[in-house]
Amino acid sequence: MKKTRVTFFTDNFPPESNAPASRTYEHCIEWLKQGAEVTVITCNPNFPKGQLYTGHKNGLYKKEMMDGIKVIRVWSYITPNRGTFKRILDYLSFAVSSFIVSLFHKTDIIIATSPQLFAALGGYCSAAVKRKPWIMEVRDLWPESIHALGAINNKRVLRNLEKLVAFLYRKANKIVVVTDSFKERISDGGIDPSKIAVVKNGVNHKKYFPIPPNQELIKKHGLEDKFVIGYIGTHGLAHNLDMILEAAFEVKDPIIHFLFVGDGAMKSRLLNKKKELNLTNVTMLDMVSSQEVSQYISLSNCALVPLKKTDTFKTVIPSKIFENAAMGKPIILGVEGESKTLVEGYGVGVFFEPENKADLINKIELLLKDRLLYQKCQKNCQQLAADFDRVELANKMYKHILEVVHAKNSIKDKGFSVKHRTTST
């Protein structure tokens, strides 16, 4: 039986360890098990600092194998995540490079993931030229999210991005989104709901599961006898970590300690703020590899999942929820909307109003003092993690891939049949 050849366009891929890189890699691994032949076209690893990882060069073209996945790395203009013009140049350069390289690669279907949006544009252009079906995966709503963060405020740029998004939605054979809210928003914009599939984020149970706290790391970072509130991930504009540091300044209980692990556009600013406030109850560490993340999650008593207070973020579900739940860490959630419904529905944590320091402190103290509530949240974490198994979700998406490929082949077969009968007549 012929293997289905899948080509995936993505701006992030291991050794980068952010959520989109992990989702794509883990999905591709499962698709290989289903009999697919998978190629990933990506840039050279540089997220989140906009600096090349050790051992990598920003060459025009490099091919490697990663656990059975053919990875093609292409040149892109690499820049830190600051400045509208430079970021757009970064995104566009990847779209152009990935498109050109893809023309020399055989495939049955193309998948392109957004953000960033221009990766999806590269995927669409490749599919159009090669006359192959394509799926647009939407992990964030652009340009709404970047506008909500103030990353881009130029009205002309935003209008053009809106037109581009609408165009890509129309042209995609299938749209795969990560939340129910995304599907509702996109269908409200005039896209047929039957064209939109929901494949939510989940967790790799081989990587994230309950483990005892790493005692060596606890001693190394002075976390003995502390109630640790952990934040592990990107330190970006969306996460409102300034407010978390301000809340830490107002915390009176010496047992409560905040642990930040990661990097991003706001990291240097946050380090300066920590110094200015003379925070002794906050530890800020550099980004760790994806293999080390679970060891640092093990240090926490609770997981902090904050975002800025904006209607746009009511539609998202941060992947941190699933990873921390799988390790039995109750969630302290500062995200409204679908995330709040999920966390409260499963009973895996507590909600605080985004950007409300007093409410955050109250909820931390509640989980510290109410042991029955804490233990109940821990127990409920097991069910949430089980219901969002990455393997099952990857297989769900692969079914959508096969459906699109078969539908395209069916149209081709019918077209040939009609042409053949006409010629015979």
Image: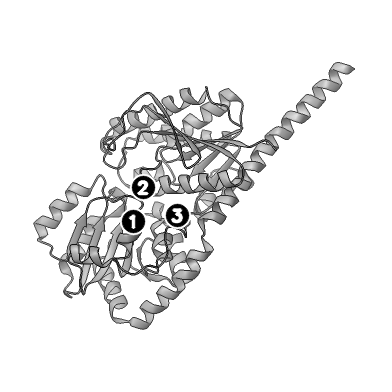
Residue 20 pos. (x, y %)? 42, 46
Q: Secondary structure at mark 2?
A: loop
Q: Work out whether mark 2 precedes mark 1 in sequence or the reverse, and give the earlier one.
A: 2
Residue 317 pos. (x, y %)? 43, 56
The residue under label 3 is: 315
Q: Nearer the viewer, mark 3 or mark 1?
A: 1
Residue 127 pos. (x, y %)? 56, 28
Mark 3 to mark 1 CA distance (whole Å):
26 Å
Residue 75 pos. (x, y %)? 36, 26
Does the rendering let one see residue 186? no
| Above/below status of 9 relative to 181 | above
Q: Nearer the viewer, mark 2 or mark 3?
A: 2
- Tell me: 424 left or right of 260: right
Mark 2 to mark 1 CA distance (whole Å):
9 Å
Amino acid type shown at disc 2:
Ser
**Hey, which quadrant is residue 110 in on the image?**
top right
Amino acid type shown at disc 1:
Val
The residue under label 2 is: 17
Q: Work out whether mark 2 precedes mark 3 in sequence or the reverse, and give the earlier one.
A: 2
What residue is shown at x 26% (from left), y 76% (from top)? 365
The answer to whether mark 2 and mark 1 are in CB contact below 8 A is yes
| Above/below status of 49 relative to 287 | above
What residue is shown at x 26% (from left), y 35% (from top)? 83
Depth check: give the residue in front, 67 or 10: 67
- Tell me: 121 left or right of 264: right
Amino acid type shown at disc 3:
Thr
The residue under label 1 is: 293
